[in-house]
Image (spheres, helix red, strand yellow):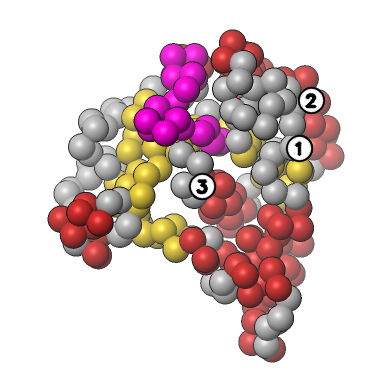
């Protein structure tokens, strides 16, 4: 179970969407559980990413033939893939487990994506810390482990940049990578070619984790719903 951690509006959902696309391109069967966006808005983001067209243009529906052709090609491509997006504005362990099992029987699942982990069906993550710990443990072991599938998700950070329930999440997941926008000073020091976003592996049971000053350089283009690996400001091994 691999989680991306980030503050509110830091691009966690866009990272998960891109992970989903990468898995679909590898012909994996993907289930995306979404507590944030209904399927219409998610699809608009997905089409913006696939067509490299600004999200607001896709969302408005007002675009020319060149974009129409790209959108139709993207939709045709998606229809050939085994991908399911389900909007669950609130869920608990039982409803999540039931949803995953239902899709597993109808489509099959290689990758489960959860956007994002909340406690007690609350609109605020970590309202009930004990329940959140149980939820992450259930997803890792009773779903991903028992079904032999990959799990990817997101958690929200506090304003101080910490996972509010770090002890329980850290104990129950495999890896957490923190997404953070670079400061203007960091962009200047690293160089613009090194991107505007940093990704730091802060909790890791699958390999080494990075120190506070270490990070992977990314370029984030929000209006295109897109992350690209940038030139690295230092050599990253094994990253």
Is disc 1 in contact with disc 2, using a CB cutoff of under 8 Å? Answer: yes
Q: Magenta stretch: residue 167 in it? A: yes
Alpha carbon separation for disc pair 1 and 2: 9 Å
Q: Name the residue at 57% across, 74% down.
A: 53
Where does label 3 land, which residue?
Answer: 9
Part of the protein shown in magenta:
153-170
Q: If you read the primary sequence from the N terminus, does the residue marked by circle 3 or circle 2 appear first?
A: 3
Going from N to C along the chain, the mark reached first, 3 or 1, is: 3
Mark 2 crowd level (few <14, some 14–19, many ≥20, 10 Å Cα): few
Which residue is under mark 1?
88
For residue 54, above or below residue 175: below
Q: Where 99 falls versus 235 (above or below)?
A: above
Rendering coords of residue 223 (x, y %):
52, 66
Please say whether residue 141 is visible from this viewpoint: no
Identify the residue shown where x is 74% and y is 69%: 76
Measure the C-alpha gap from mark 3 to mark 2. Answer: 26 Å
Quarter of the view holding residue 91: top right
Q: Which of marks 1 and 2 is nearer the N terminus?
A: 1
Q: How crowded is mark 3: few (under 14 residues within 10 Å), some or many (20 or more)?
A: few
Q: Name the residue under label 2.
A: 95
Residue 209 shown in magenta? no
For the residue labelled by badge 1, is the local secondary structure a helix, a strand or a loop?
loop
Q: How far apart are marks 3 and 1 (CA)?
A: 19 Å
Secondary structure at badge 3 equals: loop
């Amino acid at each position: 179970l691999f989680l991306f951690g980030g503050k509110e509006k830091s691009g966690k959902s866009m990272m998960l969407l891109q992970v989903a696309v990468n898995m679909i391109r590898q012909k994996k069967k993907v289930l995306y559980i979404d507590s944030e966006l209904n399927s219409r808005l998610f699809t608009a983001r997905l089409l913006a990413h696939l067509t490299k067209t600004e999200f607001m243009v896709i969302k408005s529906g007002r675009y020319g033939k060149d974009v129409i052709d790209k959108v139709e090609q993207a939709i045709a491509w998606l229809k050939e893939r085994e991908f399911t997006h389900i909007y669950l504005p609130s869920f608990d362990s039982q409803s999540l487990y039931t949803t995953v099992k239902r899709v597993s029987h109808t489509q099959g699942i290689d990758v489960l994506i959860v956007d994002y982990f909340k406690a007690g069906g609350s609109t605020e993550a970590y309202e009930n810390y004990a329940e959140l710990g149980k939820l992450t443990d259930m997803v890792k072991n009773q779903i991903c482990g028992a079904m032999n599938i990959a799990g990817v998700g997101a958690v929200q950070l506090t304003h101080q940049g910490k996972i509010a329930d770090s002890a329980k999440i850290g104990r129950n997941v495999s890896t957490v990578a923190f997404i953070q926008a670079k400061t203007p000073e960091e962009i200047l020091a690293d160089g613009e070619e090194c991107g505007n976003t940093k990704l730091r592996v802060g909790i890791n049971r699958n390999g080494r984790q990075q120190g506070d000053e270490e990070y992977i350089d990314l370029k984030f283009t929000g209006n295109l719903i897109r992350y690209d690996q940038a030139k690295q400001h230092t050599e990253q091994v094994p990253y």
